[in-house]
Image (tube, rainbow, N blue to C red):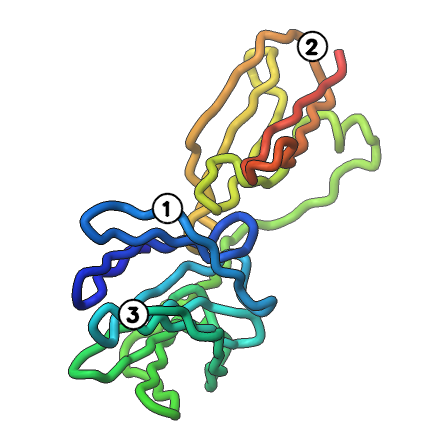
C-alpha cells in the first residue's frame, strides 16, 4: 500500500513473507527498504492500511487475530510502539480502511457477515446498508471415493506457497491431463478464495501417475520453489 503524508514524505508499505512490515520512503529520491517487526497477533495475510493525521506523520493499521486491529505511528522523526484496539459487535473479516479528516481519524472494518462497522473515538458503530457475506455457500457437494489408493492418490496433488515474491500465497496443482501428460497449474488466491490461473505447464511424460508437488524456500529469499515428482 502507499501513502502520501502531508508534507514531503511519501511511503510504500507491505507485509513481507517473514511477517514483518517493510517500507521505503520517497523524499526527492527513494530510500532503502526498512523493516519493522510486527506483534505476534498480526494476521499473516493482513494488508497494511495507511493514513496521515498530520504533517509528515503516518499511521499504519494491520488486522490481527482475536478481532484486534494493530496500529503504529510515525511522528515525523521516529516510530512509536505498536498498540491495538478490539473490534466489537462481530468477527473481523478481510476489509479494513482508515481516513483522516479535519484532524479526526475514522477507522472502518468489515465483519464476516458483510456488515461495516466504524470507530472515531472509543465506541464502535455499525453503519447502515446491505450486507454482503464474506463467506458463502459454494454449492459443492462431496462424495466418498473408493478406498483403493490407486484411485484416490494417482490423479492429482496440490500445495500452497509464496511463489511470486509479493507476500501472497498461491496454489500449485498437479494432475493427470487428458493429453496423456502431467499438468502443473499455478493459481492466485483472491478475496473470498476466488482462484485465478496465472501460469500452467504441460509435461510430455506419457503414462505418468502419482503426481506430487511440494513447496518451500531453499535459499533464504522468502520466495518458495516448486518440487515435482511422479511415477512412470
**Mark 2 and mark 1 residues within 8 Å of each other at the beta carbon:** no
Q: Which residue is mark 2?
A: 207
Q: Residues within 10 Å of mark 2 (few under 14, many from 20)?
A: few
Q: Secondary structure at mark 1?
A: loop
**Gap in Å between the C-alphas at discs 3 and 2?**
63 Å
Residue drawn 28% across and 71% down?
57
Q: Position of residue 221 (x, y in %)?
A: 56, 36
Q: Position of residue 64 (x, y in %)?
A: 52, 69
Q: Nearer the viewer, residue 220 or 152?
A: 220
**Mark 3 and mark 2 residues within 8 Å of each other at the beta carbon:** no
Q: Position of residue 1 (x, y in %)?
A: 33, 55
Residue drawn 66% across and 23% down?
228
Q: Nearer the viewer, residue 174 or 104?
A: 104
Q: Is 103 positioned to the left or the right of 43 in the image?
A: left
Q: Which residue is mark 3?
A: 76
Q: Going from the N terminus, do you reach mark 2 or mark 1 first?
A: 1
Q: Which residue is mark 1?
A: 32
**Gap in Å between the C-alphas at discs 1 and 3?**
17 Å
Residue drawn 51% across and 19% down?
201
Q: Secondary structure at mark 3?
A: loop
Amino acid at each position: 500500500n502507499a501513502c502520501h503524508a502531508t508534507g514531503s514524505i511519501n511511503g510504500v508499505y507491505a507485509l513481507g513473507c517473514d511477517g514483518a512490515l517493510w517500507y521505503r520512503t520517497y523524499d526527492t529520491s527513494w530510500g532503502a527498504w526498512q523493516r519493522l517487526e510486527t506483534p505476534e497477533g498480526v494476521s499473516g495475510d493482513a494488508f497494511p492500511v495507511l493514513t496521515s493525521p498530520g504533517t509528515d506523520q503516518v499511521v499504519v493499521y494491520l488486522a490481527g487475530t482475536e478481532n484486534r486491529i494493530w496500529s503504529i505511528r510515525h511522528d515525523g522523526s521516529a516510530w512509536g510502539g505498536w498498540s491495538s484496539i478490539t473490534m466489537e459487535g462481530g468477527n473481523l473479516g478481510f476489509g479494513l480502511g482508515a481516513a483522516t479528516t479535519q484532524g479526526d481519524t475514522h477507522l472502518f472494518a468489515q465483519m464476516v457477515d458483510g456488515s461495516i462497522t466504524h470507530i472515531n473515538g472509543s465506541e464502535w458503530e455499525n453503519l447502515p446498508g446491505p450486507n454482503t457475506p464474506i463467506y458463502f455457500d459454494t454449492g459443492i457437494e462431496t462424495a466418498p471415493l473408493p478406498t483403493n489408493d490407486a484411485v484416490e492418490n494417482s490423479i492429482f496433488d496440490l500445495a500452497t506457497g509464496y511463489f511470486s515474491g509479493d507476500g501472497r500465497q498461491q496454489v500449485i496443482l498437479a494432475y493427470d491431463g487428458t493429453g496423456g501428460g502431467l499438468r502443473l497449474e499455478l493459481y492466485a488466491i483472491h478475496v473470498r478464495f476466488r482462484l485465478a490461473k496465472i501460469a500452467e505447464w504441460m509435461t510430455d511424460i506419457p503414462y505418468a501417475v502419482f503426481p506430487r508437488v511440494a513447496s518451500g524456500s531453499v535459499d533464504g529469499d522468502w520466495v518458495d520453489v516448486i518440487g515435482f515428482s511422479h511415477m512412470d
